[in-house]
Image: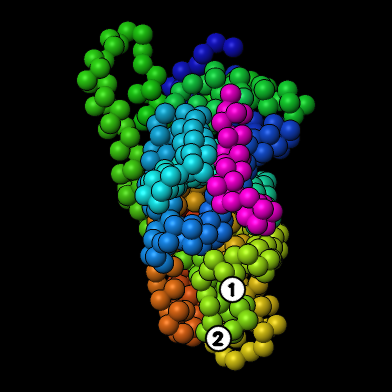
Amino acid sequence: MPVIEAESSIGVRGMDDEAPAYTLDEALACLGFGKFQGLVLAYAGLGWFAEAMELMLLSFVGPTVKSQWGLSSGQESLLSTVVFAGMLVGAYSWGLVSDNCGRRKGFLGIAVLTSGAGLLSAFSPNYESLVIIRCLVGLGLGGSTVLCSWFLEFVPAPHRGKWMVVFSTFWTLGAIFEASLAWLVMQRLSWRWLLAFSSLPSIALLLFYGIVPESPRYLCMKGRINDAHKILQEIALLNQSELPPGMLVPDSTVGQEEKSAPSKYTPLLSSTRKVIVDFKSVFSSFFMLFSSTLIQTTLLLWVLLFGNVFSYYGIILLTSELSSQQGKCGSTILSSENLQNDSLYINVFVTSLAELPGLLLSAIIVDRLGRKLSMALMLVLGCIFLFPLLFNVSANLTTAMLFGARMCVMGSFTIATLYAPELYPTAVRATGAGVASSVGRIGGMICPLVAVGLVTGCYLTEAIILFEVVMAISAFSSLLFPFETKGQELSDSVDHVSDSIQVASFR
């Protein structure tokens, strides 16, 4: 098939009705969800599995390192804070890289950094080196939003909600597996072995990188229609299906397409000028998030993800406190003394199981009620579950309410993770989702500082009220998004997003 320029492709589709043509979304709908998407799901899911393991291990490694090296509580907390700080920077940086250089190049950097730093941290000779290396691990983990966006771009629109929830299940499975691994390793070997074993999924990402395909949607955006068509042919072959008749054409032109496909008559840019052009291209992706069309979406998404992440870690903290034997105001921080007790691992294991019914519920309702209403419903239910904890209730009821609250917050967070990349056009999809994820990480960093002060000061009622308010604000913000994406094709340009907003305003 000859290479087709973006402009001529659109001309064929729009002006020559006798020449059959199809768009990428039409091709994906025709090819369906098959073995190819299953392999893409496995690779992207492995990245989320690895992130969950690297974050959950902090619950077990921190107290042991504190005891072994004689650290203060602040130094122990810093081990977790630097990981979130790295993720804050990484989510934004990897989003820019993948939107301007390609999804695959982003994966390579993410896999190299996460696997290398993760394994190297097991050999840290002192506290200072461990802090620096774990920050690098967080920098790599911040690229998980790129994996999410990449998988999303292979899924047909009618099934996107269901399969994105399935994708999110890898996180919960990673958390459960890490608790089980820590149960086996920590009492028999040492925390260094746990760090080494926990880096294996990231190493697997690097090993399988060579077979990872580029996103055909990204290729179409860059005007590389022939390359995108080849990947669609591979999908058809593996799925045992057929492409629609005719030629693949992009949905619309994007300004960056013309820049990325230089004409053979254009002289080569000097190296200095090329650096300047690349620099402007990178930062144009960020500033596009604040254009008149996208600024409302961007700000609302920041509020939504900040509230979801803040509430998620807050409920985990409340579970640790209110489920403890000392009841209302006991030992809330995992100490090195109880680290040797099986109850620590059992507690983390059981509370992580609460996320499975949350994922199931979100999978059932996300393509029926839509993204906006589903998130609002889950967050409101979470508030209802937390409300009885403002009063004196039995231990069993407390456990049940916390279980239900974590189930709902996990469901809402899963849908928000799906909704974020759907809201942005292809040119800034990974950047927009990455920046929003970074804002969410700020919620993860602030939550322990605020909530720990309230809980350790025996202000449990105030802590619960705080989480109720944050969840209520998040629920309200989810209803203010300008358009719903349920069953809709992904946008390839800002104009498509603008059209979606106009259509939604008339409903």
| Residue that badge 1 annotates | 319
- Residue at 35% across, 53% down: 295
- Residue at 36% across, 13% down: 263
Question: Can residue 372 be spotted in the picture?
Answer: no
Q: Which dot marks residue 328?
A: 2
Neighbour tally class for label 2: few under 14, some 14-19, many 20 plus, Cα within 10 Å: some
- Residue at 57% across, 91% down: 391
The type of residue carrying mark 2 is Lys
**Quadrant of residue 59 in the image?**
bottom right
Q: Is residue 209 a member of the stretch shown in magenta?
A: yes
Q: Position of residue 89 (x, y in %)?
A: 37, 47
Q: Which dot marks residue 236?
A: none
Q: Position of residue 1 (x, y in %)?
A: 59, 12
Nearer-the-camera pick, 108 or 217: 108
**Count of residue discs:** 2
N-term mark: 1 or 2? 1
Nearer-the-camera pick, 444 or 1: 444
Q: From the viewer's perspective, is residue 361 above or below residue 222? A: below
Secondary structure category for the residue under label 2: helix
Nearer-the-camera pick, 69 or 87: 69
Q: What secondary structure characterizes most of the magenta part?
A: helix
- Residue at 46% across, 85% down: 458
Tell me where the magenta segment starts and ends, as one range. Answer: 181-210
- Report whether 352 appears left or right of 276: right
Report the Cα–Cα distance between label 1 and label 2.
11 Å
The type of residue carrying mark 1 is Thr
Nearer-the-camera pick, 195 or 431: 195
Q: From the viewer's perspective, is residue 439 above or below residue 452? A: above
Secondary structure category for the residue under label 1: helix
Q: Is residue 417 a member of the stretch shown in magenta?
A: no
Q: Position of residue 302 (x, y in %)?
A: 41, 58
Q: Are marks 1 and 2 in contact (CB under 8 Å)?
A: no
